[in-house]
Amino acid sequence: MKTYLSVWFNANGDTPSQVTMKLEKIGFKVAQGNYDYIYDWGRKADIEEVIMLGDKIQKVLNGSNVLFKMETI
């Protein structure tokens, strides 16, 4: 499974490089195309794990003044 992340930046918030460093610390990789970042589970994750990853994303981006959307397939 993979979790795909899209991020919307605000001119008054963290820079793309700052957001990237924060997301890389929790296992995301930069992507090109329809999504900005990808988290590769390397296996099938259950819904509770996906929700917990969403919590981690929210925690690491708190105060960054960005919005995010995640999609897990």
Image (cartoon, grey):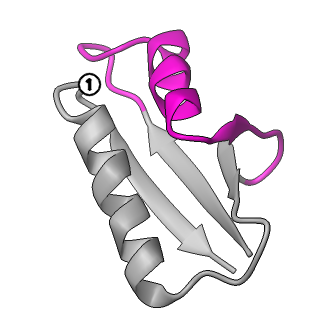
Q: Is residue 60 left or right of residue 24?
A: left
**Residue at the extreme left of the image, as rendered:** 63
Residue at position x 45%, y 59% in the image: 69
- Residue 24 shown in magenta: yes
Residue at position x 53%, y 88% in the image: 46
Residue 66 x/y as whole percent: 31, 34
**In the foreground, 40 or 31:** 40
Q: Is residue 70 left or right of residue 59?
A: right
| The quarter of the displayed image where residue 73 is located | bottom right
Residue at position x 55%, y 23% in the image: 20
| The quarter of the displayed image where residue 13 is located | top left
Residue at disc 1, secondary structure: loop
Magenta stretch? 9-34
Q: Is residue 15 left or right of residue 35?
A: left
Residue at position x 63%, y 41% in the image: 28
Q: Circle 1 is placed at which residue position?
A: 64
**Residue at the extreme front of the image, as rendered:** 43
Q: Amino acid at mark 1?
A: Ser
- Residue 1 shown in magenta: no
Residue 63 x/y as whole percent: 16, 27
